[in-house]
Image (cartoon, grey):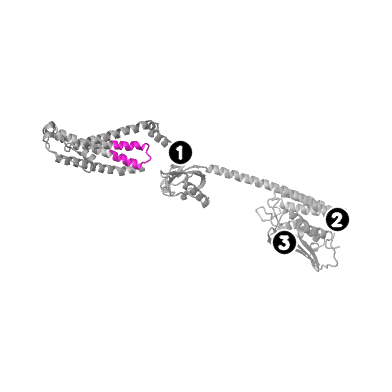
Amino acid sequence: MSGFHRSARTFNPILRRAAAIVFLIGSAGVLAAASRGGDAHGSCAECAASANVTPITAASIPVVSTILDTTGFPPRWECGTGWTPLLGWTHIVSDVVIWGAYFTIPAMIAFYMVRRPAVPFPLIGWLFGAFIFACGSGHLIEAAIFWWPAYKLSAAVKVVTAIVSVATVAALAPVIPKALALPDIARETRELTFQKFALDQSAIVAITDSKGRITYVNDKFCEISRYPRGELIGQDHRIINSGYHPKAFFRAMYATIARGDVWHGEIRNRAKDGGIYWVDTTIVPFRDEAGRVTRYVAIRSDITAQRQTAEQLELALRRQQQMLDREHALLRELEHRVRNNLAGLLGLIGVYEQSGKNSADLASAIRGKLRAMLHVHELMAPAPGMPVDLEALLRALADQIVGDARSRIHIGGPRVSVLSKQAGALSMILQELFTNSSKYGALSDPGGCIDVEWDATHANQHTSVVIRWTEHIPGFDPGPTREGVGCRLIRGFVSSELRGTCDFIFRPGGMLFLMNTLLDAAEPSEDFVTSPHAGDPNHERSNRSTEAFAQADERGRRAGEPDADPRRG
């Protein structure tokens, strides 16, 4: 119910009581005046001559005394011979009723003007009220004259009424054009009703009081929030808070609208059924006549589909960027591998040239190193550029190089990941160790075996790894030793590529190779390579390449002499 209707309901009984009181007072006054008079008889002249009227005086107020002086005037009942009770009382009652109405109408106008100070042209309202009140006062005096001949007071009231009426006309004349220029209230009401209907059809609308309690929601609000209107009225907007935005977000919003400023932004809400929806929101504060914010109107539009599209596009762009980054990383990895492999081969050739080995030995050594590189590349084929598991690398090289003798190799240690740029150098070192063990070491003796163990310590961006390669050879006598080509190659790779140190310890019953390396830290991921062929779509083709390479290597071995033992002169 609007404030106007509530005021009207309060005001109507007040007016009825006021009208009744006024009517009773007026009637009492008329009856009191009547009690002073007598029966109607005689002519005006006779009445004037024979009347013995006591004048009303107010010595302290000469002007009022003059106006209220009734000397020389008979009551109306005594003026003339044609007055009958019916005619006289018809005048009296009509004047009293008119006076009661003319008194009540100004009271209603005054009440409305006080309660609605923003009404247009307020002066006209007050002048109309004064004019009607003056007219009513004249009618009351006319009723009292039947017993109290206050003709001078009646004239004074008529003068006042004339002055007020002329002032009303003078004030009304310039107002008429302005009033005609005002919009048609009925048309404006229809226009506002239509605009509200159109807004409700396209927007999500909610109105709250100054404390944030919901006082109105349209059907669109109920539809998107899944709440019935009855569960929303009286609540605040925390009922649809999704918890997505931080508290600082809403504090800034409330501070803005509390100042009376308009706020605009996008909010993520949660429906009653748990569904998430996004709305583009504009909150408009509404001020009263005193400038205080009394309520807020929030107009929203559903942008859930746009947000989902934007998120999908952002995700697609992120994935595309990841693919580009991956391709760039693969290109860098390929360039790094090619450069390191070529550098390793060039260094290998230089070492063998200085050692005085023949071409067959050089070809066999190069063939072995290329085979080790191929094993590493096969191992990393399922996930190029990803870290390689140290144990997987050892087992893959053992399978490829020593064949059936791998059952005499015991491998164990914590999980260590090796980046591809260091895996190549590590594979060449292990290939050299496996190859020489097969020719001269533990694997060349049917009773020999190898234990490979390692420890790892993770610190900052590096992993310190200590590898112990222990060969057990029954009856082995170290005798005098000197480092050969293989030892020099291993030391070179350990120092330059793995940033570490190594040592060969020959003792009765076998040999210990101790290597301390500093590997770049690599966090295992779902692409972490732990199997030489896991997920490799080209495994069969790689096997064929490896077999062809091994056959060529075997033919080279038969054509030349075996490699020198890296542990001996």
Image location (x, y in percent) of residue 482: 85, 64
Q: Secondary structure at mark 3?
A: strand
Between circles 1 and 3, the one closer to the viewer is: 1
Q: Is residue 311 left or right of residue 442?
A: left
Disc 3: which residue: 465
What kind of element bears circle 1?
helix
The overriding secondary structure of the stretch rendered in magenta is: helix
Point out the image quarter for the N terminus: top left
Q: Position of residue 133 (x, y in %)?
A: 27, 38
Q: Considering only order in the chain, which callout, 3 or 1, is on the residue closer to the N terminus?
A: 1
Q: Measured along the vertical axis of the image, is residue 145 above or below residue 482?
A: above
Q: Are marks 2 and 3 in contact (CB under 8 Å)?
A: no
Mark 1 Cα-neighbour bin, 10 Å: few <14, some 14–19, many ≥20:
some
Amino acid type at image mark 1? Leu
Q: Which residue is mark 2?
A: 352
Whole-Å distance between the Cαs marked 1 and 3?
A: 71 Å
Question: Is residue 43 placed above or below 362 in the rendered structure?
Answer: above
> Mark number for residue 199?
1
Question: What is the distance, in whole Å, between disc 2 and disc 3 at their CAs?
Answer: 29 Å
Pick whichever, 379 or 37, lies toward us. Answer: 37
